[in-house]
Amino acid sequence: MKDFLDKIKDILYDGTEYILMIAIIAVVALVINWRLDGLFAMDVENSDKQITLDNESIVDDYNEYVKNTEDETPKEEETEDNEEVKETENVVINVTIPSGALPNEIASILVSKGLVESKSEFIDKVVEMGVEKKLKSGTFKIAKGSSLEEIVNIISK
């Protein structure tokens, strides 16, 4: 009986190193997975939808839209719209991004300042341009009518 207990004790002592190594590897893998999920978390609410497009219907709809806008738009409204666009282009907004802010947090700041329509658009553009890890912190001056690409370029310089 004593030999049997000694063998079990030897197995446990020898196996503890391996058990400890496996536990450390599991903890490291879980932490990495947790941080990567937080870093690349995106709103994927609309990914299930299937969209079917018919080229002819799109062309017909576009032609109809062009005809309607040509008939209904007087020239006085165009000049007023142009003045409004010039006014919005001249407005410069100061955006402060804190150090260590993730793309999701930066998107929230831009949405609150009215520079971006939605978080998901900004995050999609950042991923598309491949600058997820190049976004900078600090204070940036961004024109009100800037496109998503311009905003991403300003923040990632």
Image (tube, rainbow, N blue to C red):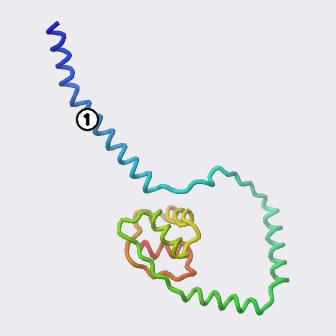
Q: Residues within 10 Å of mark 1 (few under 14, many from 20)?
A: few
Which picture quadrant has residue 56? bottom right
The residue lying toward the viewer, choosing from 54 and 113, is 113
Figure quadrant of residue 45: bottom right
**Label 1 secondary element:** helix
Is 103 displayed left or right of 120 in the figure? left
Q: Is residue 5 above or below residue 112?
A: above
Residue 13, percent from left and from top: 18, 24
> Which residue corresponds to the image point at 44% horizontal and 73% vertical from the top-left?
155
How far across and how far down the image is residue 149, in percent?
Answer: 53, 72
Q: Give the answer, above or below, for where 30 lies relative to 129.
A: above
Residue type at mark 1: give it: Met
Please name the residue shown 59% across and 70% down the image.
Answer: 117
Quadrant showing the C terminus: bottom left
The count of marks equals 1
Tell me the quadrant of the picture where the N terminus can be found: top left
**153 on left or right of 11:** right
**Rendered view: 16 above or below 87:** above
- 125 on left or right of 17: right
Q: Position of residue 68 (x, y in %)?
A: 84, 78
Residue 145: x %, y % from top left: 57, 81
Furthest residue in direction top, as rendered = 1
Task: Name the residue carrying label 1.
Answer: 21
What residue lies at 79% left-to-right and 58% top-to-bottom? 54
